[in-house]
Amino acid sequence: MKMILTIPWLVMILFLHACSFSGTNQQTTILVSSASSLQGLLADVEEQFEEKYPDIDVVFNFGSSGSLKQQILYGAPVDVYLSASKDAFVELIREKKMDKEHSTILLRNSLVLVTKDGITIRDTKDLTSSVIERVAIGTPESVPAGKYAKEALTALQLWEDLHPKLVQAKNVRQVLTYVESGDADAGMVYKTDAVSASDIHITTEIPENLHTPILYPVGVTNFGKEKKEAMLLYEFLQSQEIQHSIEKHGFQKVTGGDLP
């Protein structure tokens, strides 16, 4: 998978320019900024899409939805945006950075509590026990999974008690790394990431009524709306052609999701 991670815009532009003219045949490069939790799914999508459209080169910029939103707000040359935060996406619509006519809710996910193999707890209430010294979550202000974790822990009246134990991470992948390495005893991540992780045990799935629904909007930016290739990818992401990949990676497809 071709990807770039939160890099300066000038470097991003030069990188895209180089991609567009590499090889013997000229390709059109489209830049997709996406939440880190979609990496596995989008690896499959890239392979399928580029096989169908060999003249299009898709480059991914993965990061937290909040950081990617800020990049787009300040003019990053992004063509398509996939967010793990509906709020972040809606803000871009209100700021006229997204093409509202080509934006929709695409996927749904769930939140789970994970521990490293060998650490046994029954549910979220056990996080307060002395067995658990550190709990990893995404930074709530910039990482949607962290925001959902804070909402759930607050609803369970555990946020204040657990606050001294919390280790905050810049994205979901880092939360998993903390748990896998033993730098945290437990963590709260998306189910789709936990399923694909090694040496990780899913302790419990967090009830959806404890947090905002975990929805993934997708849309073409106002920067990319003049590119027919960006529109092709937007349509491909909603097609039945990738349904198997969506299910394989543990997501649920949302049909007809409305955005304000």
Image: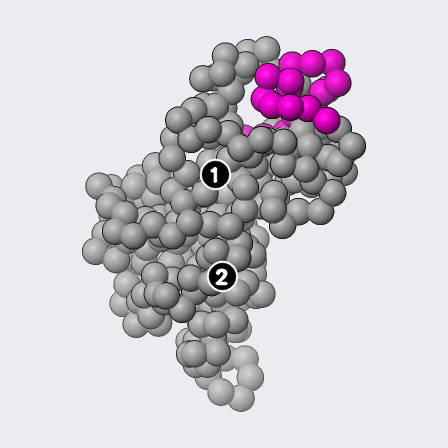
Residue at 45% from the left image edge and 17% from the top image edge: 155
- According to the image, what is the colour scheme of the structure? one colour
Q: What residue type is labelled 2?
A: Ser
Q: Would you place residue 245 above or below residue 108 in this image?
A: below
Can you tell which quarter of the image residue 225 is in? Answer: bottom left
Q: Which of the pair 234/190 is nearer the observer? A: 190
**Mark 1 surroundings within 10 Å by alpha-carbon count, few (fewer than 14), some (14 through 19), many (20 or more):** many
| Residue that numbered label 2 is attached to | 245
**Is residue 132 magenta-colored?**
yes
For residue 54, above or below residue 65:
below
Occupied quadrant, residue 209: top left
Q: Give the range drawn in magenta.
A: 120-140
Which image quarter is the N terminus in? bottom right
Earlier residue among tags 2 and 1: 1
The answer for how far apart the CA atoms under marks 2 and 1 are is: 17 Å
Asked if residue 251 shows in the view, the reply is yes
Q: Which residue is drawn at 63% across and 36% down?
A: 202
Q: Which residue shows up at 67% across the image and 29% down it?
A: 186
As drawn, the label of residue 110 is: 1
